């Protein structure tokens, strides 16, 4: 399946999730992420402000602040580049043409200062540790020479055993993948 078709199918699949599914899966993701060594070691965490179909990042930002971490969020730049800027509850944000909230001011943080990047996307492959994003290529360009931890948090609907989309040589692979545990199979 080509990437464009896969993206369209994933957006439809994620749009069909119920509010109850989202709440349960977000809680499962949060528990796993906050217990992870990557989260506990990180002092500077890069996070996007999530859209409606994505894993809710607002609780992750609040927890990072509560844990004394510095949160940085991306801002798109010309030529499909991006930089990360400090994000606090006083930050001014603007919605881009992509529908993403970005900082309006501040000084970008050097890539080498970021310990952990929570990489957004629509689908993730457990075996290859590949991801498919929204199609801009911004993250693959940024991550190409990034030395910190590349971690993704995903709903069960985003996780696949193998990539069901073509993985290109320039697609940057993940270091870690945290997938929500399906509540219907737990012994709680």
Image (cartoon, rainbow, N blue to C red):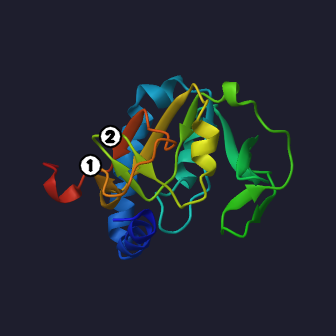
Instruction: Give the Cα separation between the discs numbered 2 and 1.
Output: 7 Å
Q: Is residue 18 above or below residue 113?
A: below
Q: Residue at x 70, y 53 (%)?
A: 80
Q: Mark 2 = which residue? A: 128
Q: Is residue 12 above or below residue 32?
A: below
> Is the Cβ of the residue at disc 2 closer than 8 Å to that at disc 1?
yes
Quarter of the image for residue 111 reads: top right
Residue 148, position as x, y percentages in the image: 56, 27
Taking the image as shown, residue 42 lies to the left or right of residue 90, namely: left
Q: Residues within 10 Å of mark 2 (few under 14, many from 20)?
A: some
Residue 135, position as x, y percentages in the image: 55, 60
Q: Residue at x 52, y 45 (%)?
A: 119
Q: Residues within 10 Å of mark 1 (few under 14, many from 20)?
A: few
Circle on res. 162: 1
Residue 171, position as x, y percentages in the image: 49, 44
Q: Secondary structure at mark 2?
A: loop
Residue nearest the observer in this picture, 100 or 135: 135
Q: Is residue 174 above or below residue 89?
A: above
- Is residue 134 visible in the rendered image? The answer is yes
Taking the image as shown, residue 72 lies to the left or right of residue 59, namely: right
Query: Which of the two labelled residues, at mark 2 and mark 1, occupies the earlier sequence position?
Result: 2
Residue 174, position as x, y percentages in the image: 44, 37
């Amino acid at each position: 399946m080509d990437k464009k078709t896969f993206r369209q199918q994933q957006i439809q699949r994620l749009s069909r999730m119920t509010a109850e599914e989202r709440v349960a899966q977000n809680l499962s993701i949060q528990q796993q992420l906050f217990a992870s060594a990557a989260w506990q070691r990180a002092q500077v965490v890069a996070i996007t402000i999530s859209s409606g179909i994505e894993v809710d990042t607002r609780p992750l930002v609040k927890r990072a602040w509560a844990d004394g971490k510095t949160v940085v969020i991306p801002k798109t730049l010309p030529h499909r580049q991006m930089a990360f800027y400090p994000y606090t509850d006083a930050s001014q944000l603007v919605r881009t043409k992509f529908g993403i909230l970005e900082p309006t001011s501040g000084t970008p943080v050097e890539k080498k200062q970021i310990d952990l990047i929570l990489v957004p996307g629509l689908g993730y492959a457990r075996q290859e540790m590949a991801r498919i994003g929204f199609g801009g290529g911004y993250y693959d360009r940024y991550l190409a020479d990034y030395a910190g931890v590349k971690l993704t948090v995903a709903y069960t609907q985003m996780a696949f055993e193998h990539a069901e989309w073509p993985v290109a040589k320039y697609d940057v692979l993940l270091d870690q993948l945290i997938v929500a545990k399906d509540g219907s199979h737990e012994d709680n």
